[in-house]
Image (cartoon, helix red, strand yellow):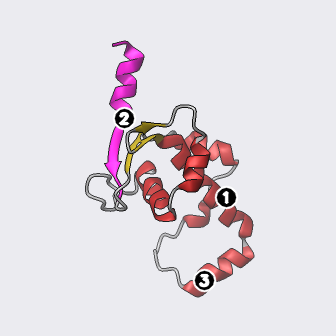
Amino acid sequence: MSVLDQLKARRRHQVTLRSGLLVGYHYPDLNECILKIGQIPLADFNPNGDVTEEAAARFITEQPQAVEAGLAYTRAVVAAMLDDIDGEVLEGVDPEEVVRLLEPEDRQELFLIGTRQRDPETGKAL
């Protein structure tokens, strides 16, 4: 086994999402994802964690570009981390198309794992 193969194997992880979908992944380079969308998505930053529906609706109305950047960042992170779905390697498949076809809950769960906000083993926040 070559050094590159060894490094690839060490980066590879698997998780069964709450939906039952088995996903092979590696942790993405978040800096590359930020560069891809062209800005740091601060729209999701809320140090207090207490967002009301009214505040969320106001934010969406007042800053639609920030909301779209946050969605683009989520999609970029998930696309960058995917290796396989239910054992089917994603070679020759557009990862962004796969991300679009994922259920929103699966996409969000993968995003939280990829950004190291959720432990893939326990499902608990880090």
Q: Earlier in the sequence, mark 2 or mark 3?
A: 2
The magenta stretch spans which residues?
1-17
For label 1, the SS is helix
Residue 91 rendering spot, x and y as whole percentages: 52, 32
For label 3, the SS is helix
Residue plotted at (68% across, 62% down)? 68
Residue that carries the numbered disc 2 in the rendered image: 12
Residue that carries the numbered disc 1 in the rendered image: 69
Q: Mark 1 to mark 3: distance in Å?
A: 18 Å
Type of the residue with mark 1: Ala
Residue that carries the numbered disc 3 in the rendered image: 55
Residue 11 on the magenta segment: yes
Residue plotted at (50% across, 37% down)? 90
Circle on res. 49 = none
Q: Quadrant of the N terminus?
A: top left
Q: Earlier in the sequence, mark 1 or mark 3?
A: 3
Q: Quadrant of the C terminus?
A: bottom left
